[in-house]
Image (cartoon, grey):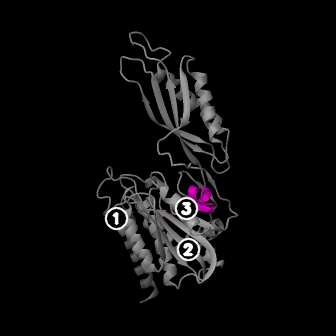
Amino acid sequence: MQGTEMENERVNTEISFLRHLVSIPSVTGNEKQIAEFLEDEMRKIGMEVVLGSAGENQPVVLGILRGAKDGPVLVFNGHMDTHPVENYQGNPYLAEIKDKKLFGRGSVDMKGGLAAMMCSARRIADQGGLKKGTLILAAVPDEEMLSRGTSRMVCMLEEMGIQADGGIVGEPTKLKVGSFMRGVTHIDITVTGYPKHTSGENHTGNAIVQMGRVLAALEGELTEKYQKRRHPILGSPIFNVGLIQGGEKPNVAAKQCCVTLLRRDMPGEDSSQVMKEIEELAKAVIDETCQVKVCESKIQKRPGKKRLPMEVGKEERIVRMLLGAAKDVTGENQDVDMVPFWCDASIMSNEGRIPTVVFGPGDIACAHSPKEWIDLDQYEKAVAIYEKTAVRFLHGCQEVK
Protein backbone atom coordinates (compact mmCIF):
# COMPACT_ATOMS: atom_id res chain seq x y z
CA MET A 1 0.00 0.00 0.00
CA GLN A 2 1.36 3.43 -0.97
CA GLY A 3 2.04 6.12 1.62
CA THR A 4 -0.89 8.29 0.57
CA GLU A 5 -3.27 5.35 0.67
CA MET A 6 -2.03 4.38 4.12
CA GLU A 7 -2.50 7.94 5.35
CA ASN A 8 -6.02 8.10 3.94
CA GLU A 9 -6.89 4.81 5.60
CA ARG A 10 -5.57 6.05 8.94
CA VAL A 11 -7.57 9.28 8.65
CA ASN A 12 -10.73 7.33 7.83
CA THR A 13 -10.13 5.05 10.82
CA GLU A 14 -9.65 8.00 13.15
CA ILE A 15 -12.80 9.72 11.90
CA SER A 16 -14.72 6.45 12.29
CA PHE A 17 -13.51 6.27 15.89
CA LEU A 18 -14.89 9.76 16.57
CA ARG A 19 -18.19 8.85 14.91
CA HIS A 20 -18.49 5.83 17.18
CA LEU A 21 -17.85 7.92 20.30
CA VAL A 22 -20.53 10.41 19.27
CA SER A 23 -22.98 7.56 18.62
CA ILE A 24 -22.78 6.43 22.27
CA PRO A 25 -25.25 8.32 24.53
CA SER A 26 -23.39 9.78 27.50
CA VAL A 27 -25.37 12.64 29.01
CA THR A 28 -23.97 13.53 32.44
CA GLY A 29 -24.84 10.79 34.92
CA ASN A 30 -24.89 8.07 32.28
CA GLU A 31 -21.25 7.63 31.26
CA LYS A 32 -20.89 3.90 31.95
CA GLN A 33 -21.36 2.66 28.36
CA ILE A 34 -18.84 5.02 26.81
CA ALA A 35 -16.39 4.34 29.65
CA GLU A 36 -16.54 0.61 28.98
CA PHE A 37 -15.93 1.19 25.27
CA LEU A 38 -12.92 3.41 25.97
CA GLU A 39 -11.53 0.93 28.50
CA ASP A 40 -11.65 -1.79 25.85
CA GLU A 41 -9.98 0.46 23.27
CA MET A 42 -7.21 1.40 25.71
CA ARG A 43 -6.47 -2.27 26.35
CA LYS A 44 -6.31 -2.92 22.59
CA ILE A 45 -3.71 -0.18 22.27
CA GLY A 46 -1.67 -1.89 24.96
CA MET A 47 -2.34 0.58 27.75
CA GLU A 48 -2.54 -0.42 31.38
CA VAL A 49 -6.02 0.51 32.65
CA VAL A 50 -6.89 1.79 36.12
CA LEU A 51 -10.54 2.35 37.01
CA GLY A 52 -12.14 4.66 39.54
CA SER A 53 -15.57 6.13 40.17
CA ALA A 54 -17.06 9.60 40.61
CA GLY A 55 -20.57 8.28 41.28
CA GLU A 56 -23.10 5.69 40.15
CA ASN A 57 -22.66 4.95 36.43
CA GLN A 58 -19.82 7.49 36.34
CA PRO A 59 -16.51 5.61 35.94
CA VAL A 60 -13.13 7.30 35.69
CA VAL A 61 -10.89 5.48 33.20
CA LEU A 62 -7.11 5.95 33.20
CA GLY A 63 -5.16 4.46 30.31
CA ILE A 64 -1.42 4.35 31.02
CA LEU A 65 1.21 4.01 28.28
CA ARG A 66 4.60 3.46 29.88
CA GLY A 67 7.91 4.08 28.15
CA ALA A 68 10.90 1.74 28.10
CA LYS A 69 12.62 4.00 30.65
CA ASP A 70 11.42 6.19 33.48
CA GLY A 71 10.86 9.83 32.63
CA PRO A 72 8.33 12.65 32.77
CA VAL A 73 4.59 12.05 33.14
CA LEU A 74 2.07 13.74 30.82
CA VAL A 75 -1.69 13.61 31.35
CA PHE A 76 -4.24 13.94 28.55
CA ASN A 77 -7.68 14.67 30.02
CA GLY A 78 -11.02 14.50 28.24
CA HIS A 79 -14.56 14.35 29.59
CA MET A 80 -16.98 11.70 28.37
CA ASP A 81 -20.23 13.35 29.41
CA THR A 82 -22.32 15.64 27.22
CA HIS A 83 -24.99 18.29 27.52
CA PRO A 84 -28.60 16.93 27.39
CA VAL A 85 -30.17 16.21 24.00
CA GLU A 86 -33.80 17.36 24.42
CA ASN A 87 -33.35 20.48 22.29
CA TYR A 88 -31.10 18.90 19.67
CA GLN A 89 -32.39 19.25 16.11
CA GLY A 90 -32.32 15.81 14.48
CA ASN A 91 -30.70 12.62 15.71
CA PRO A 92 -28.02 13.62 18.25
CA TYR A 93 -26.25 10.26 17.88
CA LEU A 94 -26.23 9.82 14.09
CA ALA A 95 -22.75 11.40 13.75
CA GLU A 96 -23.56 12.56 10.23
CA ILE A 97 -20.80 14.14 8.11
CA LYS A 98 -21.44 17.07 5.77
CA ASP A 99 -18.89 19.43 4.24
CA LYS A 100 -16.06 18.16 6.47
CA LYS A 101 -18.18 18.74 9.56
CA LEU A 102 -19.29 15.96 11.89
CA PHE A 103 -22.63 16.66 13.61
CA GLY A 104 -23.90 15.22 16.88
CA ARG A 105 -24.22 15.87 20.59
CA GLY A 106 -20.80 15.94 22.17
CA SER A 107 -18.97 16.11 18.84
CA VAL A 108 -17.16 19.32 19.83
CA ASP A 109 -17.71 19.26 23.61
CA MET A 110 -15.62 17.29 23.88
CA LYS A 111 -15.62 13.91 22.20
CA GLY A 112 -13.57 15.46 19.40
CA GLY A 113 -10.72 16.25 21.78
CA LEU A 114 -11.07 12.95 23.62
CA ALA A 115 -11.08 10.91 20.41
CA ALA A 116 -8.05 12.82 19.09
CA MET A 117 -6.15 12.06 22.28
CA MET A 118 -7.03 8.37 22.00
CA CYS A 119 -5.93 8.29 18.37
CA SER A 120 -2.64 10.02 19.20
CA ALA A 121 -1.92 7.36 21.83
CA ARG A 122 -2.70 4.67 19.26
CA ARG A 123 -0.28 6.27 16.78
CA ILE A 124 2.46 6.27 19.41
CA ALA A 125 1.80 2.63 20.31
CA ASP A 126 1.74 1.59 16.64
CA GLN A 127 5.15 3.21 16.13
CA GLY A 128 6.74 1.14 18.87
CA GLY A 129 5.66 2.99 21.97
CA LEU A 130 7.53 5.49 24.13
CA LYS A 131 11.28 5.40 24.67
CA LYS A 132 10.83 6.91 28.12
CA GLY A 133 8.28 8.63 30.30
CA THR A 134 4.58 7.90 30.82
CA LEU A 135 1.49 9.07 28.98
CA ILE A 136 -1.77 8.89 30.96
CA LEU A 137 -5.05 9.31 29.13
CA ALA A 138 -7.86 10.17 31.56
CA ALA A 139 -11.46 9.76 30.38
CA VAL A 140 -13.57 11.45 33.05
CA PRO A 141 -17.31 11.92 33.81
CA ASP A 142 -19.34 14.77 35.30
CA GLU A 143 -17.52 17.75 33.75
CA GLU A 144 -20.79 19.35 32.68
CA MET A 145 -22.06 19.39 36.28
CA LEU A 146 -19.67 19.29 39.25
CA SER A 147 -16.37 18.09 37.72
CA ARG A 148 -16.14 15.25 40.20
CA GLY A 149 -14.46 13.09 37.56
CA THR A 150 -11.27 15.12 37.28
CA SER A 151 -11.15 15.69 41.04
CA ARG A 152 -11.30 11.90 41.41
CA MET A 153 -8.59 11.53 38.75
CA VAL A 154 -6.31 13.83 40.77
CA CYS A 155 -6.89 11.67 43.86
CA MET A 156 -6.22 8.47 41.89
CA LEU A 157 -2.87 9.79 40.69
CA GLU A 158 -1.96 10.74 44.25
CA GLU A 159 -2.97 7.29 45.50
CA MET A 160 -0.74 5.75 42.81
CA GLY A 161 2.18 7.94 43.86
CA ILE A 162 2.24 9.79 40.53
CA GLN A 163 3.00 13.51 40.27
CA ALA A 164 2.46 14.49 36.65
CA ASP A 165 4.75 17.03 35.03
CA GLY A 166 2.27 18.44 32.54
CA GLY A 167 -1.28 18.12 31.27
CA ILE A 168 -3.59 18.99 28.41
CA VAL A 169 -7.39 19.23 28.60
CA GLY A 170 -8.87 18.74 25.13
CA GLU A 171 -11.74 21.24 25.26
CA PRO A 172 -12.42 23.07 21.96
CA THR A 173 -10.12 26.07 21.48
CA LYS A 174 -9.91 26.11 17.65
CA LEU A 175 -6.37 24.74 18.09
CA LYS A 176 -5.24 27.73 20.16
CA VAL A 177 -3.21 27.25 23.35
CA GLY A 178 -5.19 28.40 26.39
CA SER A 179 -3.13 28.73 29.56
CA PHE A 180 -5.12 31.44 31.35
CA MET A 181 -8.62 31.05 32.76
CA ARG A 182 -10.98 33.00 34.98
CA GLY A 183 -12.50 31.22 37.95
CA VAL A 184 -16.24 30.90 38.54
CA THR A 185 -18.36 31.70 41.60
CA HIS A 186 -22.15 31.52 41.81
CA ILE A 187 -23.42 34.25 44.13
CA ASP A 188 -26.87 34.72 45.73
CA ILE A 189 -28.03 38.24 46.58
CA THR A 190 -31.16 38.28 48.73
CA VAL A 191 -33.16 41.40 49.60
CA THR A 192 -35.74 41.12 52.38
CA GLY A 193 -38.44 43.77 52.78
CA TYR A 194 -41.89 43.59 54.34
CA PRO A 195 -45.28 42.74 52.80
CA LYS A 196 -48.06 45.27 52.45
CA HIS A 197 -51.38 45.51 50.64
CA THR A 198 -51.10 46.89 47.11
CA SER A 199 -53.98 49.37 47.26
CA GLY A 200 -51.32 52.06 47.20
CA GLU A 201 -48.25 52.60 45.02
CA ASN A 202 -45.05 50.56 45.26
CA HIS A 203 -43.51 51.16 48.66
CA THR A 204 -40.06 51.04 50.14
CA GLY A 205 -40.54 47.57 51.62
CA ASN A 206 -41.14 45.86 48.27
CA ALA A 207 -38.14 43.53 47.89
CA ILE A 208 -38.51 43.28 44.12
CA VAL A 209 -38.47 47.06 43.70
CA GLN A 210 -35.41 47.26 45.96
CA MET A 211 -33.69 44.49 43.99
CA GLY A 212 -34.19 46.58 40.86
CA ARG A 213 -32.02 49.25 42.46
CA VAL A 214 -29.38 46.64 43.28
CA LEU A 215 -29.33 45.34 39.71
CA ALA A 216 -28.95 48.85 38.34
CA ALA A 217 -25.98 49.40 40.67
CA LEU A 218 -24.40 46.11 39.61
CA GLU A 219 -24.73 47.03 35.94
CA GLY A 220 -23.42 50.54 36.45
CA GLU A 221 -21.17 51.14 39.43
CA LEU A 222 -19.84 47.59 39.90
CA THR A 223 -19.12 47.10 36.21
CA GLU A 224 -17.23 50.40 36.17
CA LYS A 225 -15.14 49.30 39.15
CA TYR A 226 -14.36 45.95 37.55
CA GLN A 227 -13.22 47.54 34.31
CA LYS A 228 -10.47 49.32 36.22
CA ARG A 229 -9.04 45.96 37.42
CA ARG A 230 -7.41 44.55 34.33
CA HIS A 231 -5.30 41.44 33.92
CA PRO A 232 -2.96 41.55 30.88
CA ILE A 233 -4.46 38.35 29.42
CA LEU A 234 -7.81 37.81 31.16
CA GLY A 235 -9.10 41.37 31.13
CA SER A 236 -11.57 42.30 33.90
CA PRO A 237 -13.89 40.36 36.21
CA ILE A 238 -17.30 39.91 34.60
CA PHE A 239 -20.67 38.64 35.81
CA ASN A 240 -24.04 37.52 34.51
CA VAL A 241 -27.35 37.74 36.39
CA GLY A 242 -29.00 34.52 35.30
CA LEU A 243 -31.76 33.84 37.80
CA ILE A 244 -34.27 35.93 39.76
CA GLN A 245 -37.00 34.78 42.15
CA GLY A 246 -39.34 36.81 44.33
CA GLY A 247 -42.80 37.58 45.54
CA GLU A 248 -45.83 35.44 46.36
CA LYS A 249 -48.93 37.13 44.92
CA PRO A 250 -49.66 40.03 42.56
CA ASN A 251 -51.72 41.78 45.25
CA VAL A 252 -49.03 41.66 47.97
CA ALA A 253 -45.79 43.62 47.95
CA ALA A 254 -42.90 41.19 47.74
CA LYS A 255 -41.26 40.34 51.05
CA GLN A 256 -38.21 38.71 49.49
CA CYS A 257 -36.33 38.69 46.22
CA CYS A 258 -33.22 36.71 45.32
CA VAL A 259 -30.95 36.88 42.27
CA THR A 260 -28.18 34.45 41.39
CA LEU A 261 -25.26 35.70 39.39
CA LEU A 262 -22.32 33.87 37.90
CA ARG A 263 -19.11 35.78 38.43
CA ARG A 264 -15.90 35.07 36.53
CA ASP A 265 -13.08 35.64 39.00
CA MET A 266 -9.52 36.86 38.53
CA PRO A 267 -6.30 35.34 39.89
CA GLY A 268 -5.45 36.68 43.33
CA GLU A 269 -8.96 37.77 44.27
CA ASP A 270 -10.25 37.01 47.75
CA SER A 271 -13.78 35.59 47.66
CA SER A 272 -14.76 37.15 51.01
CA GLN A 273 -13.75 40.57 49.72
CA VAL A 274 -15.69 39.99 46.49
CA MET A 275 -18.84 39.22 48.51
CA LYS A 276 -18.27 42.14 50.85
CA GLU A 277 -17.94 44.60 47.98
CA ILE A 278 -21.24 43.46 46.43
CA GLU A 279 -23.01 43.58 49.80
CA GLU A 280 -21.79 47.10 50.55
CA LEU A 281 -22.92 48.30 47.13
CA ALA A 282 -26.37 46.75 47.65
CA LYS A 283 -26.77 48.23 51.12
CA ALA A 284 -25.94 51.66 49.76
CA VAL A 285 -28.85 51.67 47.29
CA ILE A 286 -31.71 49.86 49.07
CA ASP A 287 -34.05 51.44 51.59
CA GLU A 288 -32.87 51.34 55.20
CA THR A 289 -35.98 49.42 56.19
CA CYS A 290 -34.80 46.42 54.16
CA GLN A 291 -32.00 43.92 54.61
CA VAL A 292 -29.58 42.38 52.12
CA LYS A 293 -27.52 39.19 52.27
CA VAL A 294 -24.77 38.13 49.84
CA CYS A 295 -23.36 34.59 49.91
CA GLU A 296 -22.06 31.82 47.70
CA SER A 297 -24.93 30.01 46.00
CA LYS A 298 -25.62 26.31 46.38
CA ILE A 299 -26.37 26.08 42.65
CA GLN A 300 -23.81 23.73 41.07
CA LYS A 301 -21.56 24.14 44.08
CA ARG A 302 -18.67 21.67 43.94
CA PRO A 303 -18.49 19.60 47.17
CA GLY A 304 -15.73 21.15 49.24
CA LYS A 305 -14.05 22.68 46.18
CA LYS A 306 -14.02 25.93 44.24
CA ARG A 307 -13.76 26.77 40.54
CA LEU A 308 -10.49 28.66 40.78
CA PRO A 309 -8.72 30.77 38.14
CA MET A 310 -5.68 29.36 36.34
CA GLU A 311 -2.40 30.83 35.10
CA VAL A 312 0.27 28.74 33.36
CA GLY A 313 3.22 30.71 32.02
CA LYS A 314 5.12 30.29 28.76
CA GLU A 315 8.14 29.05 30.67
CA GLU A 316 6.37 25.76 31.44
CA ARG A 317 7.60 22.84 29.38
CA ILE A 318 4.09 21.73 28.37
CA VAL A 319 3.39 25.18 26.92
CA ARG A 320 6.62 25.29 24.93
CA MET A 321 6.22 21.77 23.57
CA LEU A 322 2.59 22.33 22.58
CA LEU A 323 3.26 25.67 20.89
CA GLY A 324 6.05 24.09 18.86
CA ALA A 325 3.98 21.08 17.83
CA ALA A 326 1.03 23.29 16.85
CA LYS A 327 3.28 25.43 14.67
CA ASP A 328 4.72 22.35 12.92
CA VAL A 329 1.26 20.99 12.07
CA THR A 330 -0.65 24.20 11.30
CA GLY A 331 2.20 26.34 10.03
CA GLU A 332 1.05 29.19 12.27
CA ASN A 333 2.95 31.03 14.99
CA GLN A 334 0.85 31.62 18.07
CA ASP A 335 1.20 32.82 21.63
CA VAL A 336 -0.57 31.68 24.78
CA ASP A 337 -4.10 32.97 25.21
CA MET A 338 -7.05 32.76 27.58
CA VAL A 339 -10.01 30.42 27.40
CA PRO A 340 -13.29 32.29 27.97
CA PHE A 341 -14.88 29.36 29.82
CA TRP A 342 -14.00 27.43 32.96
CA CYS A 343 -13.03 23.75 32.68
CA ASP A 344 -11.21 20.88 34.38
CA ALA A 345 -7.76 22.31 33.57
CA SER A 346 -8.22 24.49 36.65
CA ILE A 347 -8.63 21.39 38.82
CA MET A 348 -5.51 19.78 37.39
CA SER A 349 -3.48 22.97 37.91
CA ASN A 350 -4.80 23.95 41.34
CA GLU A 351 -5.77 20.67 43.01
CA GLY A 352 -3.31 18.41 41.22
CA ARG A 353 -0.39 20.87 40.95
CA ILE A 354 -0.01 19.83 37.31
CA PRO A 355 0.92 22.62 34.85
CA THR A 356 -2.01 22.24 32.46
CA VAL A 357 -3.21 23.94 29.29
CA VAL A 358 -6.45 23.78 27.32
CA PHE A 359 -6.11 22.80 23.66
CA GLY A 360 -8.49 21.04 21.33
CA PRO A 361 -10.27 20.99 17.98
CA GLY A 362 -13.50 22.85 17.28
CA ASP A 363 -15.26 26.02 18.37
CA ILE A 364 -16.76 26.32 21.86
CA ALA A 365 -19.58 28.40 20.33
CA CYS A 366 -20.95 25.13 18.87
CA ALA A 367 -21.09 23.41 22.26
CA HIS A 368 -24.56 22.63 23.66
CA SER A 369 -26.15 23.98 20.47
CA PRO A 370 -29.14 22.43 18.65
CA LYS A 371 -26.82 21.46 15.76
CA GLU A 372 -23.51 20.78 17.46
CA TRP A 373 -20.63 20.01 15.08
CA ILE A 374 -16.86 19.76 14.83
CA ASP A 375 -14.47 20.69 12.02
CA LEU A 376 -12.84 17.44 10.87
CA ASP A 377 -9.75 19.20 9.49
CA GLN A 378 -9.10 20.57 12.97
CA TYR A 379 -9.78 17.15 14.46
CA GLU A 380 -7.13 15.48 12.30
CA LYS A 381 -4.62 18.23 13.04
CA ALA A 382 -5.32 17.80 16.76
CA VAL A 383 -4.39 14.11 16.55
CA ALA A 384 -1.01 15.00 15.03
CA ILE A 385 -0.38 17.85 17.49
CA TYR A 386 -1.17 15.70 20.52
CA GLU A 387 1.13 12.97 19.19
CA LYS A 388 4.04 15.34 18.56
CA THR A 389 3.56 17.08 21.90
CA ALA A 390 3.54 13.82 23.85
CA VAL A 391 6.67 12.43 22.20
CA ARG A 392 8.62 15.67 22.56
CA PHE A 393 7.51 16.26 26.13
CA LEU A 394 8.31 12.72 27.26
CA HIS A 395 11.41 12.05 25.17
CA GLY A 396 12.96 15.48 25.52
CA CYS A 397 13.69 15.56 21.78
CA GLN A 398 12.84 18.15 19.16
CA GLU A 399 11.49 15.93 16.41
CA VAL A 400 9.06 13.05 16.24
CA LYS A 401 10.97 10.02 14.97
At 47% from the left and 30% from the top, the residue drawn is 258
The residue to which callout 3 is attached is: 155
Q: Is residue 336 left or right of residue 200?
A: right
Question: 304 or 7: which is nearer to us?
Answer: 304
Amino acid type, mark 3: Cys
At 66% from the left and 43% from the top, the residue drawn is 269
Q: Which mark is residue 116?
A: none
Which element type, helix, strand or loop, lies under badge 2?
strand
Please tell me whether residue 141 is drawn above or below residue 300 in the rendered image. below
User: Toward which corner of the image does residue 249 lie, by quadrant?
Assistant: top left
Mark 1 burial class by Cα count in 10 Å: few <14, some 14-19, many 20+:
many
Amino acid type, mark 1: Ile
Mark 3 burial class by Cα count in 10 Å: few <14, some 14-19, many 20+:
some
The mark that comes first in sequence, 3 or 2, is 2
Please tell me whether residue 58 is drawn above or below residue 70 in the rendered image. above
> Which label sits in the foreground, 3 or 2?
3
The residue to which callout 2 is attached is: 135
At 41% from the left and 75% from the top, the residue drawn is 41
Residues at marks 2 and 1, CA–CA distance in whole angstroms = 25 Å
- Examine the structure image and report whether residue 140 is included in the region drawn in magenta: no
Q: Which residues are magenta?
A: 345-361
